[in-house]
Amino acid sequence: MHFEHEDREYYDLVLQETLDRVKKGEGLGEPYDAVFIDEGQDFGTDMLEVMLGLLRPDGDLVIAQDSHQDVYGRRSSLESAGIQARGRTKELKRVYRSTPQIHAFCNSLSGSGESGEGIENPQGKLFTCECRISGPEPRVLDFESEEAVLEYLGRDLQEISSRGEYRRSEIGIIYDDKQYEGDGFTYARRGLPERILESLESLGIPVLWASRNVAVKETFDNTADRLTLISVHSSKGLDFECVYLVGIDPHDRSRSGSPGAETAALVGITRARYSLTILRCI
């Protein structure tokens, strides 16, 4: 699609034009009886107002959201959008996806663990872990260059494949190609996924770059017999038994103070159900 790689200002303009049309009742067609919003933490107040404009006055609106996964920092307000949610909310407080080891790792990074050090997590400690399957401790491996990272990644993937530890569809390589500045971001490392893909394909490792473009995203099959290369933003809602994080360093203090970078690290980590490996350049 021609609009895939536009900057944030472009999408803000599209949103404002859409909201203006909604308020004027232009070109909306028949309103919906019900609207369900998933990943509601990604919706700014203007986006919520657009959704309300598509709903019948007496229609049903359901919003599912997780404040720990707010990578865009849009800081929406339900009340400001005209949504009266008080007394009509339900909070789920059980972590069921990840092992206790991964869950404890997340809490230590958010400053809620024994060390009290790590990235800033404004929501504090994560929910209580209910997963009863124990797994290996997450690995954080340091390398002197991106080339060394990719070399190790390819070698490790070949080894676990030869041992048959995981189905290929259960292995995710999650990257972050963004540079965060305050509440926004720019695409500062667009070449990263191409280099990862090229490196793995040169070793004969079957892999799909799931967030390459809209067409690939729409046809993505998470049961196919190949590894998944995906951006941290596109990985939300997905999980894998075995996860490698590339270009995501939760210990990088130079990125501290940026809500987007900090939350992106937590999102990437919590995509792992059993095994987590973080590959970082020092």
Image (tube, rainbow, N blue to C red):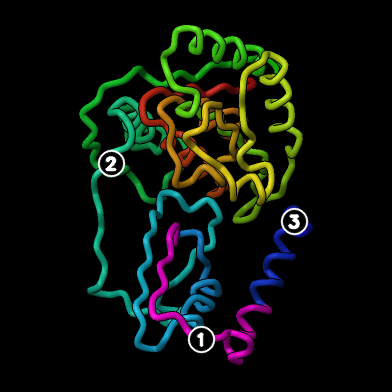
Q: Badge 3 is on which residue?
A: 1
Q: Badge 2 is on which residue?
A: 95
Specify the amino acid type for callout 3: Met
Position above or below: 8 against 12: above
Q: CA distance from mark 2 to mark 1?
A: 39 Å
Q: CA distance from mark 2 to mark 3?
A: 37 Å
The image quarter in which residue 50 lies? bottom right
Q: CA distance from mark 3 to mark 1?
A: 27 Å
Q: Nearer the viewer, mark 2 or mark 1?
A: 1
Viewer-proximal residue among 96 and 205: 205
Left or right side of 76 for 211? right
Specify the amino acid type for callout 2: Val
| Magenta-span inclusion, residue 264 | no
Point out the tag, 2 or 3, that comes first from the N-terminus.
Answer: 3
Counting from the top left corner in percent of width and height, residue 69 is at: 45, 49
Specify the amino acid type for callout 1: Glu
- The residues colored magenta run 17-40
Outermost right residue: 2
Q: Badge 1 is on which residue?
A: 30
Viewer-proximal residue among 22 and 143: 22
| Magenta-span inclusion, residue 39 | yes
